[in-house]
Image (cartoon, helix red, strand yellow):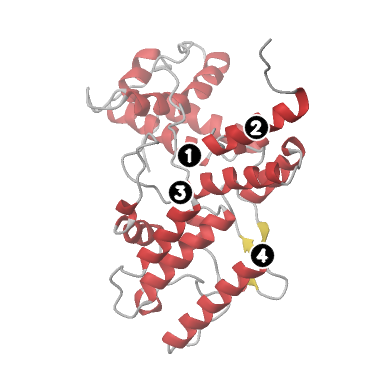
């Protein structure tokens, strides 16, 4: 059992309290316990101070990015506020000493042509039995039309895909909640063909709990496997319009959100009302979370301008 000190005990009390009122704090608890371990390793057994917090946030030297320091501090700051109220001697921590660490980098929004190109190039990925290349092609298409996260894709089971009602069950998404994704007929048909192709190549009978997406030999494919395979084909896409050096598979989720809003505008729907549908489909708890995935693409801005002119009229010279 690890030796305990003041901050370790206080961290555990804080986590127990916050979890008791409904917060999961999964990522935060990892950082806070890492901070507590840091204090024990440095034989620090005193109340919380900005000095010890800063030592933890800046560990690793000058090469540690400011954003990393900020994210470490971000997890500790609420605990620091709690400690200053309930644990005598604890100091008030400064506000944003490392600036805002969640500035949104600009993603690349894939065009329909780029998605098709990536799917076609997936067929060139080395695959002894053809499963890995087929799976990569299908996963890219599936993520593009559902906005599913990579983790949700690899966790998908055979039993989660309902070809009769054309539904996909996403279990335990990022917020720990299940959700159902309705599929278009064409998407359901593609998934059915994929499953049939896999079953024809695998001799062993698969159970309902078997992974839907597999790689070489019928083994379940993981997030790293998909990311690695994607890295072999992604150079065909130019992402100079983004803040990234290479194409990112996860940006298919951003693309899905932007395309959905685009289609709603083209259909004349009220995006302010339908946004809640997109929020639910993506597995978010609040519309604010969905805004993160929306980018002011030239196409969306053009549509928004046209809609504005329809309502208020365009600019006319005297």
- Mark 2 neighbour class, 10 Å CA radius: few under 14, some 14 to 19, many 20 or more: some
| Above/below status of 299 relative to 138 | above
Decide which of 76, 66 is in the foreground and name it: 66
* Extreme residue toward the bottom, this view: 203
- Mark 3 neighbour class, 10 Å CA radius: few under 14, some 14 to 19, many 20 or more: some
Q: CA distance from mark 1 to mark 2?
A: 37 Å
| Dot placed on the residue nearer the N-terminal end, 3 or 4 | 4
Q: CA distance from mark 1 to mark 3?
A: 20 Å
> Do the numbered discs 1 and 3 sit on residues whose CB atoms are within 8 Å?
no
Secondary structure type for disc 1 = helix
| Dot placed on the residue nearer the N-terminal end, 2 or 3 | 3
| Dot placed on the residue nearer the N-terminal end, 2 or 4 | 4
Q: Which residue is mark 4?
A: 184
Task: Give the numbered dot on residue 27.
Answer: 1
| Dot placed on the residue nearer the N-terminal end, 1 or 3 | 1
| Dot placed on the residue nearer the N-terminal end, 1 or 2 | 1
Q: CA distance from mark 3 to mark 4?
A: 22 Å
Judged by depth in the image, the label closer to the viewer, 2 or 4, is 2
Q: What x and y, as percent, mark residue 75?
A: 47, 28
> Do the numbered discs 1 and 4 sit on residues whose CB atoms are within 8 Å?
no
Q: Which residue is mark 3?
A: 250
Decide which of 73, 192 is in the foreground and name it: 192
Residue 21 visible from this viewpoint: no
Identity of the residue drawn at 66% across and 47% down: 263
Judged by depth in the image, the label closer to the viewer, 1 or 2, is 2
> Do the numbered discs 3 and 4 sit on residues whose CB atoms are within 8 Å?
no
Q: Which residue is mark 2?
A: 304
Q: What x and y, as percent, mark residue 91?
A: 46, 11
Quadrant for residue 85, please give it. top right
- Mark 1 neighbour class, 10 Å CA radius: few under 14, some 14 to 19, many 20 or more: few
Quadrant for residue 19, please give it. top right
Identity of the residue drawn at 38% across and 43% down: 1
């Amino acid at each position: 059992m690890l030796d305990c000190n003041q901050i370790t005990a206080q961290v555990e009390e804080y986590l127990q309290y916050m979890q008791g009122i409904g917060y999961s704090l999964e990522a935060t608890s990892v950082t806070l316990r890492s901070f507590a371990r840091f204090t024990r390793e440095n034989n620090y057994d005193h109340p919380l101070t900005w000095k010890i917090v800063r030592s933890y946030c800046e560990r690793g030297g000058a090469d540690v990015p400011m954003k990393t320091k900020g994210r470490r501090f971000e997890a500790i700051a609420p605990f620091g506020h709690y400690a200053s109220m309930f644990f005598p001697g604890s100091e008030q921590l400064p506000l944003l000493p490392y600036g805002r660490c969640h500035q949104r980098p600009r993603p690349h929004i894939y065009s329909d042509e780029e998605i098709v190109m990536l799917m076609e190039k997936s067929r060139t990925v080395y695959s002894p039995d053809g499963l890995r290349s087929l799976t990569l092609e299908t996963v890219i298409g599936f993520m593009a039309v559902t906005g599913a996260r990579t983790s949700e894709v690899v966790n998908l089971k055979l039993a989660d895909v309902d070809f009769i009602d054309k539904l996909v069950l996403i279990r335990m998404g990022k917020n720990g909640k299940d959700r159902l994704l309705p599929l278009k007929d064409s998407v359901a048909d593609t998934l059915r063909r994929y499953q049939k192709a896999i079953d024809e190549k695998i001799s062993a009978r698969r159970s309902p709990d078997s992974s839907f997406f597999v790689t070489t030999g019928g083994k379940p494919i993981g997030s790293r496997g998909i990311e690695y395979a994607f890295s072999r084909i992604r150079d065909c896409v130019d992402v100079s319009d983004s803040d990234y050096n290479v194409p990112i598979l996860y940006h298919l989720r951003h693309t899905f959100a932007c395309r959905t809003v685009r289609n709603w505008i083209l259909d004349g729907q009220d995006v302010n009302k339908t946004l809640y549908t997109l929020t639910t489909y993506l597995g978010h708890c609040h519309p604010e979370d969905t805004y993160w995935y929306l980018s002011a693409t030239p196409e969306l801005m053009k549509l928004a301008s046209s809609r504005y002119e329809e309502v208020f009229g365009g600019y006319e010279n005297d």
